[in-house]
Image (cartoon, rainbow, N blue to C red):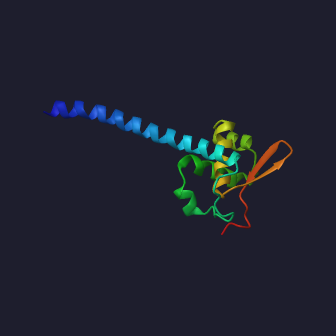
């Protein structure tokens, strides 16, 4: 009986890992969908003063929290500069930064071809 229990746990752990991977994929797909909606200007925005405080950071998924904290540390940065700090691809950071902009936590300003991301300290509590 004990051997059957041990054999039964391995498929369960594999299924659990598959479920976790699917959840991560779903999060990434949601980012892509939101970015596509944003391009069409039909996304519902949060208030511009959405604070980036400790509780907000803690409520974020890990991947967005890492990006948001990096922007806070750098002050004003491009996706390339954030990617250098987080050791992730620039395209990934660009998607995360744009999601933070959509959520109202980060501001975006274009200067020529470059987009700069920053936290508006005036609206932060």
Residue 44 place in picture, x, y as percent: 63, 57
Number of numbered discs visible in the structure rendering: 0
- Residue sitting nearer the eye, 69 or 51: 51
- Residue sitting nearer the eye, 33 or 122: 33
- Residue sitting nearer the eye, 84 or 22: 22
- Compared to residue 20, the image places residue 106 above or below, namely below
Q: Which residue corresponds to the image point at 17% horizontal and 30% vertical from the top-left?
A: 3
Which residue ends up furthest to the left in the rendered image? 1
Which residue ends up furthest to the bottom in the rendered image? 125
Quarter holding the N terminus? top left
Q: Which residue corresponds to the image point at 59% horizontal and 49% vertical from the top-left?
A: 64
Residue 120 place in picture, x, y as percent: 73, 61
- Compared to residue 67, the image places residue 121 above or below, namely below
Q: Relative to 44, is 80 on the left or the right?
A: right
Q: Relative to 38, is 25 on the left or the right?
A: left
Quarter holding the C terminus? bottom right
- Residue sitting nearer the eye, 104 or 85: 104
Q: Which of the 4 image quadrants contains residue 52?
A: bottom right
Residue 98 place in picture, x, y as percent: 68, 48
Q: Relative to 14, is 25 on the left or the right?
A: right
Residue 70 place in picture, x, y as percent: 66, 50
Q: Which residue corresponds to the image point at 61% horizontal and 47% vertical from the top-left?
A: 34
Q: Which of the 4 image quadrants contains residue 54?
A: bottom right
């Amino acid at each position: 009986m004990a051997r059957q229990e041990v054999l039964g746990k391995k498929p369960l752990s594999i299924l659990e890992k598959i479920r976790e991977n699917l959840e991560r994929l779903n999060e990434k797909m949601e980012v892509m969908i939101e970015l596509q909606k944003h391009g069409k200007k039909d996304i519902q925005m949060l208030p511009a003063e959405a604070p980036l405080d400790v509780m907000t950071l803690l409520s974020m998924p890990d991947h967005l929290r890492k990006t948001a904290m990096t922007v806070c540390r750098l002050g004003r940065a491009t996706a390339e500069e954030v990617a250098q700090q987080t050791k992730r691809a620039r395209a990934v950071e660009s998607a995360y930064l744009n999601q933070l902009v959509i959520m109202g936590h980060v501001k975006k300003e274009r200067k020529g071809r470059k987009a700069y991301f920053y936290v508006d300290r005036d609206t932060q509590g």
